[in-house]
Amino acid sequence: MVDLHEPAQAARAKLPKDRLGKNYFKLFGASTISNLGDGIGVIAYPWLASALTRNALFIALVAVVQRLPWLLFSLPAGVLTDRKDRRSLMITANVVRTVVTLGVAFGVLAQARELPGVDILNDPDAYLPTNVTLYLLVLFATFLLGTAEVLYDNAAQTFMPAIVHSEQLEKANGRLWSTEMLANTFVGPPLGAVLIAGAFALPFFVDAATFALSAVLIALIPRTAPNGPSGPVAKTSWRSELAEGIRWLWNHELLRPLAIILGMLNALGALTGAVLILFAQEVLHTSATEFAILMTGGAVGGLIGGWTASTISRRIGSGPSLYLTMLGAGATNIAIGLSSSWMFAWVMFAFGTLTAVLWNVITVSLRQTIIPDHLLGRVNSVYRFFAWGMMPIGSVAGGLLVLVADATLSREWALRLPALIGGALHVVLFAYAAPKLTTAKIDAARVVVAAEEPD
């Protein structure tokens, strides 16, 4: 394969160092709009699933199917991202998400009269899906949406260095994530609750429209180098290209443990997130509107975290910032697991998400800086294979944990258990991770790349 690292470096060096640029703001707008739709989906999909079944494993299975593509397709998506034009891949992924979401919308519309909604909340017999056809449609659609998300997210993260100078990456990522969080968990969920109140199918139609508009905005970004292959590329097998990315990540003394640790963090997050809708309904006693408001806690924390992450990282160091993520997640999980107030849980969600955004801003910017451009798609996909591939495993574990605990504990404590166990395991993970993720090691990785950048 042709080495595209040097042309990529030269192209990045020409990007403005003092501002983000108009192409960044087109990507910013596309991501914000699609995240608004995702925020609507945060309410629509779990509420639809909970209207069909009260079985924790069936609820968790929706989350499993949504994240399973990260385990199955992350690695080939990385090869595809390095072979093809990344901008075109993002547009294609959003078009697919538009079509699939429209399919769900029409499916819900056709079955709307048969949806029992929260009427099955206290029905002891409502453990098998009340509408099997619609439940299977939700599973199939979430799998396809998850597959498109794998391709879109991998392409988007590898596309960012093509339009933003390396010195602006932390700022660009922080601004993007804070606004995405605002749309995803502050504006989207309440809007989703309002739309559900109007018609069960309505949020899915709006979600489809956001994906379509996002695709249009990305199409307005001109082709920019480096953006995938910029010259003739020798034909090589997918296996050899993928192996090159795996070797690069596995031989990197910082990114290898970082990927494994993030995988553990995401598995623990999925452990509690898989049954969150049941916990919120049955323990915190939230309505659709209150559940939507509960989700805005993450938006507030994410907004603050996105705008302050680079400053916090400079003040206390990259290492302590990552420690704060792990310890903050542990503390908030335990607190939520012991709480019976959705308002208190809101505060915990805000703090937990603030620390999570710290991790994202630091580590994604680091990857975008230190991974060679011609390997960025593949190495990024291997990294996310570990990081996101653990989520379906965590979701299954969360559903099974509640299912088993239901036989020996009360329903309430069975639903509290994933958060309590997840919180304790975060502390154990911190003890393992702290020596491996020091500020000195992170700074050293950046210095090596800085020395290679052209003046």
Image: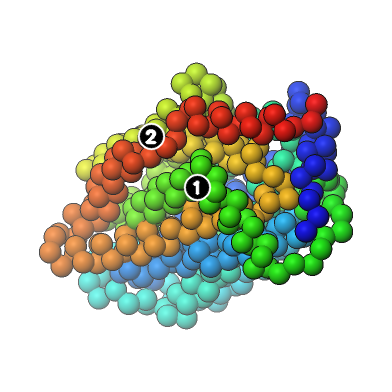
Which residue does the image show at 21% across and 58% down from the upper left?
414
Which residue does the image show at 62% across and 28% down from the upper left?
447
> Can you give x and y, in whole percent of width and height, for residue 105 in the image?
58, 68
Q: Of helix, strand and loop, which one carries label 2?
A: helix
In depth, the one of 294 and 32 nearer the eye is 32
Which residue does the image show at 40% across and 68% down from the upper left?
61
Q: Which residue is mark 2?
A: 435
Evaluate whether residue 32 shows in this view.
yes
> Can you give x and y, in whole percent of width and height, for residue 291 in the image?
39, 49
Give me the C-alpha separation between circle 2 and circle 1.
14 Å
Is residue 32 shown above or below 455?
below
Q: Please give the label number shown on residue 384.
A: none
Quarter residue 9 falls in: top right
Which residue does the image show at 58% across and 57% down from the upper left?
246
Q: Which residue is mark 1?
A: 256
> Can you give x and y, in whole percent of width and height, for residue 454 in the image?
79, 31
Q: Residue furthest bottom?
A: 133
Image quarter of the C terminus: top right
Q: Of helix, strand and loop, which one carries label 1?
A: helix
